[in-house]
Image (cartoon, rainbow, N blue to C red):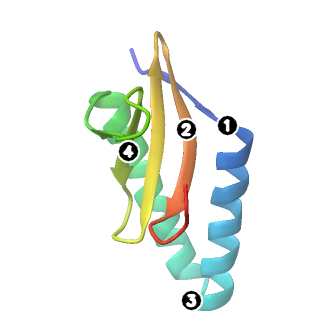
Amino acid sequence: MAQKITWMPNAREDFRDIIHYLANEWGNTFAEEFTERVSKQLELIENHLFIGKQNEQFSSIRQLPVTKNYILYYLVLHEEIIIVNLLHTNRKR
């Protein structure tokens, strides 16, 4: 059974901001491709919960690259995957 995926409000907002930025700077096709990459990573996490590398500062949080510039941070609870954040690699965490 697939785990329920829940986005923290700040993670959802960051994802929307990223999509908006990519669409404005690089076009809708680029933004759609990024969205598809995020979806594929979420599927990967659903099927392999602990595939992401443990975060060095917070061992309960895992991280999985979406692209070379963006990392998805998540937490696995009993029957839920919490998306903690989606950040650009140059942005302070």
Pick whichever of labels 2 and 3 is earlier in the sequence: 3
Residue type, numbered disc 4: Gln
Q: Name the residue tied to disc 4.
A: 63
Question: CA–CA distance between discs 2 and 3?
Answer: 25 Å
* Disc 4 to disc 1: CB gap under 8 Å: no
Which tag is nearer the camera, tag 4 or tag 2?
4
Question: CA–CA distance between discs 4 and 3?
Answer: 25 Å
Rendering coords of residue 17 (x, y %)? 70, 66
Q: Secondary structure at mark 1?
A: loop
**Depicted 93 relative to depicted 81: above or below:** below
Label drawn at residue 83: 2
Question: CA–CA distance between discs 3 and 1?
Answer: 26 Å
The residue sitting at 57% across, 39% down in the picture is 84
The residue sitting at 36% across, 67% down in the picture is 67
Q: Secondary structure at mark 3?
A: helix
Residue type, numbered disc 2: Ile
Q: Name the residue tied to disc 1.
A: 8
